[in-house]
Amino acid sequence: MTSADISNFPFEVPAFWQEEITAELQEAINEHNTDVSSLLRYHMGWEDASGQPKLETTGKLLRPKLCLLACQATGGNIQQVLPAAAALEFIHNFSLIHDDIEDNSQERHHRATVWKLWGKAQAINAGDAMFSIAHIEVLKLQHAGISARKTLSAAGMLSKACLNLCEGQHMDISYEARSDVTTQDYLNMITKKTAALLATATALGAYLGAVEDKDGRITDRFYRFGEYLGLAFQIRDDILGIWGDERQTGKPVGADIKKKKKTLPVLYALEKSSVINSKEFKEIHSRKLLEGSEVTKIIGMLDKVNARKYTQEKVEYYSHQALAQLEATGIQAAKLAPLEEITHSLVGRDY
């Protein structure tokens, strides 16, 4: 899986939002209580594999919280927007269930994945159910006081985000068997796979919250903010996956190299054939399994072409672009401060 796991990163938002979002999510699943619901509750971290309740939750609900923060920044009522926030989280988790199948991942958050416990066929059903509940949930906006026109537009925005996710995942899988992937190909892929849903989260919050946005300018600015934020975060994750401190990331140095992930530093180095021995780099990287000495050698080649510096410059570029989009909204700085703080925190993290 290429997309960064941002679910465990903490940031400050009103504490009660966690409870309200979780309550909305649980009510939506329980409303359609069927045999597959237990798989959904397990995946969300509310039950164990035998159906016994658990007190913990998985993830930090980043996307719904960004949605609510954008709504708040534009003067909206977050209570009205809760169905959209929940729908975003359902779409995110639908993609995770399917990603785990496609990547053959046996664990998520140190627990067995849905497919590992119930089989791939039933996990596909669980992901499809999550997808369906997301679309039922977003239509509840009208019952929460959002106009029919805005509710329909919100549903369209969510569907477009789903299509982007699927396209991004298709690109990611197809890249695994290709040797001609470029840095631009990679940026196009993560724009769809990682950044699109974050962008939709901030855009939805702004669109539903803004009283006056007839030309869509504010919504567009918030979409671009979320998109740039997603790009910066993913690329920062690429750095940590190679050069991160194991004590902070929980992953060994060069973890992504050993898994042979085509991340931005690796693709940048492959394009620098005039600087490094590209034939040797490609030969090592094409091996089925990489040993510790080979991982060290690859990292040395990346360092030789300043791949880390190049990648960090991309992080800074996209984070600056994200903040510029917020400023361009013309909204009072104090209302945007929480979103600016999250930007600095997410792209500056060391884990």
Image: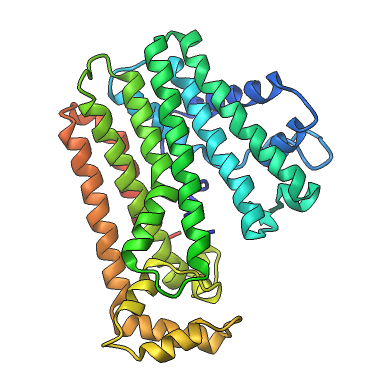
Give the image quarter of residue 279.
bottom left
The answer to whether residue 273 is above or below residue 98 is below
Across and down, in percent, residue 261 comes to 49, 69
Looking at the picture, tell me which residue is in the foreground, 244 or 180: 180
Residue furthest to the right in view is 50
Coloring basis for residues:
rainbow
Q: Residue at x 37, y 50 (%)?
A: 191
Q: Measured along the vertical axis of the image, is residue 260 above or below residue 195?
A: below
Query: At 37% from the left edge and 27% from the top edge, which residue is drawn?
Result: 204
User: Residue 6: percent from the left, percent from the top?
Assistant: 48, 49
- Placement of 24 over or under 56, stated as above or below: above
Q: Nearer the viewer, residue 40 or 248?
A: 40
- Seen from the viewer's position, the closer of residues 8 and 286 is 286
- Rendered location of residue 335, percent (x, y): 25, 27
Which residue is painted at 34% across and 58% down in the image? 187
- From the viewer's side, name the closer residue of 264 and 171: 171
Residue drawn at the location 42% of the way across and 10% of the way down:
148
Q: In the visual, does 133 lie left or right of 304?
A: right
Horizontal relation, residue 331 to residue 94: left or right: left
Q: Is residue 349 visible?
A: no
Q: Quadrant of residue 213?
A: top left
Q: What count of labels does the image hold?
A: 0
189, above or below 35, in the image: below
Q: Quadrant of residue 153?
A: top left
Instruction: Residue 114 in the image: state x and y as whole percent.
Output: 72, 47
Q: Is residue 216 visible to the viewer in this orientation of the structure?
A: yes
**Looking at the figure, which quarter contains the N terminus?**
bottom right
